[in-house]
Structure formats: C-alpha cells, structure tokens
Image (tube, helix red, strand yellow):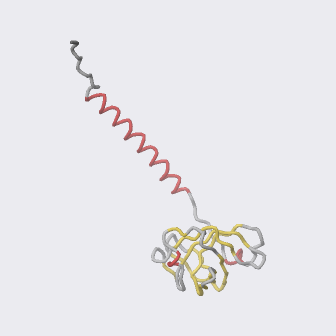
C-alpha cells in the first residue's frame, strides 16, 4: 500500500497576489471604458443645419415628439442643446421613420409617444425624413424649454 502524499496548495500569499492582480486589471479596464464614454460627445444638428439635410447623409438629432403614428413613424420638433440636460424648442419639424427592429435604448418602444423626447441616429431619405437606426429615449432625463 502506497501512502498518498498530501496535496500541496499554493500559499495564501500567492492567492492574495493573484486576486490583487485581477482587481487591478478589472480597475484598469473599467477606467478605460469610463474615459471612452466621457470623451464621446453627443453631436446634434443645429436648426440651421437641419434645414439643409441631404439624402444619404447621417443625422443625429433630438426631437420632442408632436405626433406618433401606429405605422412606426413620428414627427417632432427639433430641440437645440443648451446643456447636457436642457434643450430649447425650435420651429423646425422633422419626421422620423423606424421599424420593430430599430433598437430603442434607455426605454422601450412604448416610450416613443407624443410629448416624449428622443435622440435619433439615422439616415436622411429623399423626402427629408430620417430613417432611424437607433432611438434613445430621453424623456425624464432632460428638460425642454
């Protein structure tokens, strides 16, 4: 009968160093992601620029919705950014079309309603409507003057 040698586990000190190393790596990864998010700047169209939209161009705009149709389209008043959480109404109206596959961020499709505020990224169509590629619900997060 052979005697089994006891298993040798790494010392507690080694585990502490491994865990500390993982914590440092997680911290650095998180810091990098946060700094990237802070550098991203939300660019929206100024009212003067919105009137010059050309078919095929990309558009990023903030709208206060005035009408929402069951056919997955909406019309809204273009908002001008005053600060990160404050927008001012402009006289410019734009139409946005979307479908069930259009991603809705910070909300759900039911949050796209008359009086709601949305950030729309999309492509300008021939008739000056914007085909949304993403809609971000801002209702409740921003104020409109």
Position of the N terminus by quadrant: top left
Could you tell me residue 136's position as x and y percent? 54, 70
Q: Work out whether 79 lies above or below 26.
A: below
Quadrant of the rendered structure where residue 19 is? top left
Position of residue 16 in the picture relative to residue 58 (left or right): left
Q: State the residue at coordinates (71%, 78%).
A: 129
Say which of 58 and 92 sits in front. Answer: 58
Q: State the residue at coordinates (75%, 74%).
A: 125
Query: How many numbered badges does the structure rendering display?
Result: 0
Say which of 26 and 110 sits in front. Answer: 110
Position of residue 11 in the picture relative to residue 122 (left or right): left
Say which of 86 and 36 sits in front. Answer: 36
Residue found at the very far top of the displayed protein: 1
Position of residue 1 in the picture relative to residue 96 (left or right): left
Q: Work out whether 14 lies above or below 98.
A: above
Could you tell me residue 107's position as x and y percent? 48, 72
Could you tell me residue 134's position as x and y percent? 60, 68
Say which of 93 and 143 sits in front. Answer: 93
Residue found at the very far front of the displayed protein: 1
Could you tell me residue 130's position as x and y percent? 69, 74
Q: State the residue at coordinates (39%, 40%).
A: 24
Q: State the residue at coordinates (66%, 69%).
A: 122
């Amino acid at each position: 009968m052979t005697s089994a040698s006891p298993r040798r586990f790494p010392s507690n000190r080694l585990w502490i160093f491994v865990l500390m190393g993982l914590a440092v790596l997680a911290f650095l990864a998180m810091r990098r992601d946060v700094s990237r998010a802070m550098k991203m700047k939300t660019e929206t169209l100024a009212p003067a620029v919105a009137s010059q939209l050309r078919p095929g161009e990309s558009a990023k705009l903030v709208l206060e919705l005035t009408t929402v149709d069951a056919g997955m389209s909406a019309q809204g008043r273009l908002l001008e950014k005053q600060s990160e959480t404050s927008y001012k109404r402009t006289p410019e109206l734009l139409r946005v079309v979307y479908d069930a596959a259009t991603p809705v961020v910070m909300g759900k499709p039911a949050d796209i309603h008359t009086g709601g505020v949305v950030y729309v990224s999309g492509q300008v169509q021939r008739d000056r409507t914007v085909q949304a590629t993403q809609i971000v619900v801002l209702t409740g997060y921003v104020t409109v003057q």
